[in-house]
Image (spheres, rainbow, N blue to C red):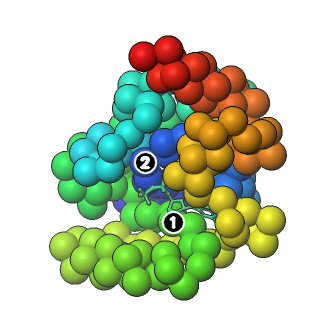
Amino acid sequence: MNRHIAIYPGSFDPFTNGHMDIVERGLEIFDTVIIAVAANSSKNSLFSVTERVDLLTKLTANNPRVKVETFSGLLVDYVVEKKARVILRGLRAVTDFEFEFQLAQMNHTVCQQVETLFMMTSPNFAYLSSSIVKEVGRLGGDISNFVPPLIKEQLLQKFSQINED
Ligand code: ADP
C-alpha cells in the first residue's frame, strides 16, 4: 500500500485553475498526484474522456510527479488497483458538502482502507466550477482567469465548432 500517492478523481470538463490549485497543494503533501478522469460520469460532457486525458497530459507534462489516467467502474476499485489509499477532493461551499460527504462515506464503507481527504478551495477559486466556465465561455465572456491557457484555447475551438453546427 503506497501512502505517498493521492488519487484526484473528477470530471474535469474542463480542468480549471481551481482544480490546478488542488493538484499543486496536493503535491505539497503527496509525492505523486494521479489525476483520474472519470469515464463513467453520467454528466453530459463537452470534451470526450480521451480529449480530457490528452489535454491534462500535455498540461502536466513538465511535472513527473503528476500522472493523468482515466478510470471506469468503482473509484475504490481503481484506488486499490493503484495501491493507493487516499482520494483527494476539493470543497468549495456548503453546497459541495452533502454530496461529497455521502460519496466519501460510501467509498469508505465499500473499502475501509480508502480514505478521502478534502482540501478547502483557495478563496480566489471558490466561485469557480467547470460548468460556470463553460457557460461564460459559450456566451463569449473572457475565461482567461479561470482556466490554463491551453484549456482556454481548446475551449474556444470547441465553441467555434459548436457555433458552426
Ligand atoms: P466531479 O464531477 O467528480 O465533481 P469535478 O471536475 O467537478 O468532478 O471536480 C473534481 C473535484 O474538484 C471535486 O472534489 C470538486 O469539489 C473539486 N473542485 C472543483 N472546482 C474546485 C475549486 N474551484 N476549488 C476547489 N475544488 C474544486
As drawn, the label of residue 66 is none
Q: Residue at x 26, y 51 (%)?
A: 42
Q: Is residue 9 left or right of residue 108?
A: right
x, y percent for residue 95: 50, 80
Label 2 sits on a secondary structure element that is loop
Q: Assess mark 1: CB under 8 A from ligand 1?
A: yes
**Which residue was labeled with disc 1?**
89
**Which residue was labeled with disc 2?**
11
Q: Note whether 6 is above or below 141 in the view shown.
A: below
Q: Note whether 124 is above or below 165 in the view shown.
A: below
Q: Quadrant of the N terminus?
A: bottom left
Ranked by sequence position, the earlier of labels 1 and 2 is 2
Q: Is residue 8 left or right of residue 125?
A: left
Find residue 111 and report its image quarter.
Answer: bottom left
Q: Quadrant of the C terminus?
A: top left
Q: Note whether 71 is above or below 63 in the view shown.
A: below
Q: Residue at x 43, y 35 (%)?
A: 46
Find residue 116 and report its image quarter.
Answer: bottom left
Who is closer to the viewer here, 86 or 125? 125
x, y percent for residue 83: 35, 53
The reply to whether residue 61 is visible in this rendering is: no
Q: Is residue 30 left or right of residue 35?
A: right
CB within 8 Å, label 1 to label 2: no
Q: Residue at x 19, y 49 (%)?
A: 73
Task: Identify which amino acid the numbered label 2 is placed on.
Answer: Ser
Q: Is residue 144 left or right of residue 67?
A: right
Q: Assess mark 2: CB under 8 A from ligand 1?
A: yes
